[in-house]
Structures are given as structure tokens and as C-alpha cells.
Image: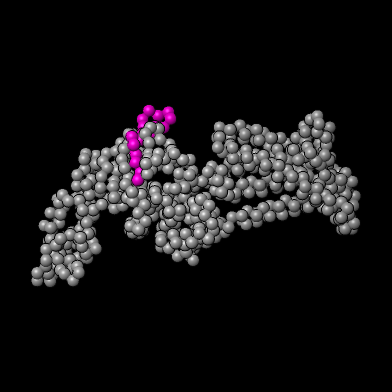
Amino acid sequence: MANPALTLLQDLSSIEDPKLIEWDWISDNFWEDIVPAIQGHIFLSFVSVAIALMISLPTGVLVSRYRKAYPPVTFVTGLLYSIPSLALFGILISVPGITIGPTPVIIALVAYSLLILIRNTVAGLDAVPAETIDAARGMGLTNRQILFRVELPLALPVIVAGIRIATVTIIGIATIGAYIAGGGLGKMIFDGINRSFPTMIITGAVLATALAIIADLSLLGLERYLRPWARRRKT
Amino acid sequence: MIEFRQVSKTYPGSDNPVVRDLSFEVPEGEICVLVGPSGCGKTTTMRMVNRLIEITEGEILIDGEPNTAMSATRLRRKIGYAIQQIGLFPHRTIADNIGTVPHLLGWNKGRIRDRVDELLELVGLSPEEYRDRYPAELSGGQQQRVGVARALAADPPIMLMDEPFGAVDPITRERLQDEFLRIQEDIKKTIVFVTHDIDEAIKMGNKIAILKQGGILAQYDTPETILAYPNSEFVASFVGTDRILKRLSLVRVGDIRLEPANGEAEDLPRIDGNLSVRDALSEIIGSGSTKGVVERDGEKGLLTIDTIEKLSRARDDSRG
């Protein structure tokens, strides 16, 4: 009956020790617990973004060509995006053949990123100037050459912007995946809650946030590195 | 040589062709300008040459071969293509942009590099300064120069140019036109050139094809003949009521026969022999006189309004 969020708050407030961070615990468990949790979290997020990209890029390219497919694709991926994460985990582990662990977490994280990634791929391709494509075709580039040498490179900033949003979202939602034994920093947070041990909660939370920020900035850096033409402006 | 044979284009789902039964020839080494009001199918006509638009009926022969004899991409790599919006690749350097077609044709790096530098020189941009820049770092006029250089890169015998100087201010446009005509004297490409501007057509064209609504060829001839003898009401109104003056703009003062100036020349306006007769006329009228003095090869000639009037009615078509 009890509202889980409320129970959680009560758990937190009933913590006896007012000391929020025990540095000793951090140094004692650094290699044993903290580093593997970070690695697990990076693994979950990276694999999810990679799989999501492998699905979204081709889908985005196809949808930008066959425009009629765009509304249904947005509808389905939008629907996936709107399912609450805990509910989606619940649904997935009740599917026969899927057991708790990283697999359902990765499936859910991929499902969440599809909308953003597909939409940004299409938007990026749409933003490629028509005259640039016309010139490319007029000079005798094949459709494939136009896609890989002209359209995708020019769509890159918008696609990478999508990857940044998706990555940050995924790193956040991945913490909840620990609820179905997905591992990662979420496990540390849940354990901290269960044990009424704020050091674990805060360590997990701060690291998850830091991971999101670092990933975001690295992708920004990558995007700028891949776009030398945008760094220089008209003189 | 490019030969249009009863070419028609009708888009699916439409009853009205945008280009109708078009037949004309573009001789080797000449500029043929397609001109007409918007919706006359001039761009469509040009784009059928390199099959960016496929023909519905008829055929286009290039040096006697139908342009469908090879794949569209192979055909396009043999035809230079320059458009108003330029369409430079923003993510590629100027050198990469110009090297696009040579790269597709598999030239080696050294050869591409030499060709890029040669072309940059040709269009008046210093290779050291511009080769490694990106398009966004260039002015509109410089970008159009690069667009033309890119179209010339693999030295194609044929070029298609769709308002290639359209996106710049009038002064820059005039300079680009002059430069291109100078280049063309050497390279002698067979060019299909699209514009909506009759003045540009008269200036650039060895031949002008005037198209009217529905893609019908109204007249195909040299600029001189079209200005002197428009074959219809439509052509006459399209070339403008100032067609006599336009015709005078095709002749340079230095090229016409003048009366010798004897003594009376002192207080008359001086006319530069490089001016067009039209500009000379303007100078003479502007100075309040009826004649001017042209100095050429150390001799003084007298240009009178009478001479100009006779010239405007003369039947000989000296140009082209």
C-alpha cells in the first residue's frame, strides 16, 4: 500500500548517523565496489547507445527517403519513450525468455533512445542544403556517395546533438535498471538505500551525474573535432 | 556538339508538357543561352542534358551519341555543372571541392593538386591563399568563381551553367561574366547557359534560345539577329523596347569604320575605343554634342550620331 517514494524518504530520514560521507568507506571499497560499478554503468550506457545508433541511423536514413513512414515510426518510438522506465523494466522481465540482469535493461535503454536518435537523424538530413545535393548529383556522385560523403557528414552536428541527449538520458535511466539487477551505479544507490547508508547513495548519485556530464562534454568535443569547417568562420 | 531532337518533358500526373517538341543544336565550342520568363522550362531543358531530369519523348545527342548510351553518373562526370546557388560542399576545403570530379575519376593526388592550383589561378584566386580554406570563409563572388572552377575541373568538353553568376551583386556579376568570356576564348567549351536576364543572354551567348511558357522554342539565333529581327511579338517584347540600343551594345567603337577627324576635333568629347557603341552614344549625348572623337592606332576618327543610326539599321551581323 505504501507509496514507494514516501517509504524511500522515510528510510532516508530515519538514517541515524548524520554523517553523510564516510571517506573511509570510499577508500576501502574503491577498487572492489566503486570502480566495477562505474565500469558496469559505462558498459550498460555505451552498449545501449551503440545498439540504438545501429538501429536509428539506417531507420532515420530510410525514413528521410520514404517520408510516409515517418509518422508511424515517430508514433511507435514516441510510445516507447512515454512508458515509465520502471514499468518498462517490469514488462520486459515478464516476457518469457528474458531474465533479470543487464539484457532487459539494455533493451529498455535502446527503446528510450530511438525517438531522439531517429528524429535527429531525419532533422539533420533535412537540413542539408538542397543545392549541395543537386550539385553533388550533377557532378556524377552516386546516391551512396552522396549519402556518405555529403549528407551524413553535414547532418553530423544534429545527429551528435541527438546522441548527447540520448546518452545523458540513458545514463540517468540506467541507474533504475539496478532494480532488475542490471548492475552499475544504480546498484550502489539501491544498496545504500536498503542499508540506510548515505555514503553509498551519494557516491552513486554523484558518479552517475559526473558520468553524464563527462559523456556530454566528450561528445561535444568529438562533434567539434569532426567538423573542422565550423570552427573557422568568414574572415 | 549537343543536339536536341524533338525533346518533350511531361511530369507524371500532368497533361501539360513543361518542354514541348524542342529541336535545336548547340555547335561545338559555343555558348548557347536558354532564356525566357519563369516557367518556360529553360532549367528543365538544361537538366535533361545530364539527365538530372529524364526526357519523356525525343532524344538529346552529344557528339552524335544519345545521352542515354551510358549510365547517368558516368555521363555527368563528363559534363561540367555550375548552378546559381553554387552548392559548394561546406565541409570540404576549396581544393577538395574543386577536386571532386577528378577524385571520382580516379586521378592521382599529385595530378588533382596541380589541376586545382591551375584552376584557382584561372579564376583569379591565389592557390596558396584559398586552397585550404572552407567555403564559408569566402565571399559570394569568390564562391561562384570556385563553383565555375569545380565545373571545369576534369576539363569536360561540355558545361551546363544555370545562372552561374546569379547570386552576386551587379558589379561582381559583370566582372565574372567578362572573366568567364575571356576564359572561354581559350577553353572553347560547348556550353548550355540558363538565365532569365536577357542582357546576360545577349552578352554571354553565341546563340540564344528564347523559350516561352510551356517550353516552346520561340526563336533560336545569334543575339544580333534576334535583336534586329525578332520573329514574333513575344520575342520583341521579351528582348525589350530598347533592343536597338542593346544591339549597339554588342559592337565596340574600335571595331566600326569611322570618318577621319579633320581639325574640327578639338572641342569634341573623347571616346575610348573599347567602349560599346551604346556607351559611346550615351557619352556623346551627355556632352551635348552630336559627335565624338575616337583615337585609335594614333589616328583620330569621328563618331557621329548619323553613323550610329546607320549602324543600328545595318543588316550585317558581324559577330558570332
Tell me which colouring the rendered structure shows: one colour
Q: Quadrant of the N terminus of chain A?
A: top right
Numbered circles on residues, count: 0
Give coordinates of residue A41: x percent, y percent.
78, 48
Residue B55 visible in the picture: yes
Taking the spot 71% from the left edge, 35% from the top edge, the residue there is A83
Q: Is residue B307 left or right of residue A137?
A: left
Q: Report the front residue among A146 and A44.
A: A146
Give coordinates of residue A17: x percent, y percent.
90, 52
Taking the spot 32% from the left edge, 50% from the top edge, the residue there is B30
Q: Report the front residue among A17 and B220.
A: B220
Residue B5 within the magenta-colored segment of the rendering: yes
Q: Which residues are magenta?
A: B1-19
Taking the spot 27% from the left edge, 42% from the top edge, the residue there is B220
- Residue A224, relative to residue A51: is it above or below? below
Occupied quadrant, residue A221: bottom right
Occupied quadrant, residue A99: top right
- Residue B84, relative to residue A27: is it above or below? above
Q: Report the front residue among B35 and A203.
A: B35
Occupied quadrant, residue A173: top right
Give coordinates of residue A60: x percent, y percent.
61, 40
Give coordinates of residue A212: x percent, y percent.
72, 51
- Extreme front residue here? B64
Taking the spot 47% from the left edge, 59% from the top edge, the residue there is B115
- Residue A222, relative to residue B215: is it above or below? below
Residue B191 within the magenta-colored segment of the rendering: no
Residue B289 visible in the picture: no
Q: Is residue A146 left or right of residue B8?
A: right
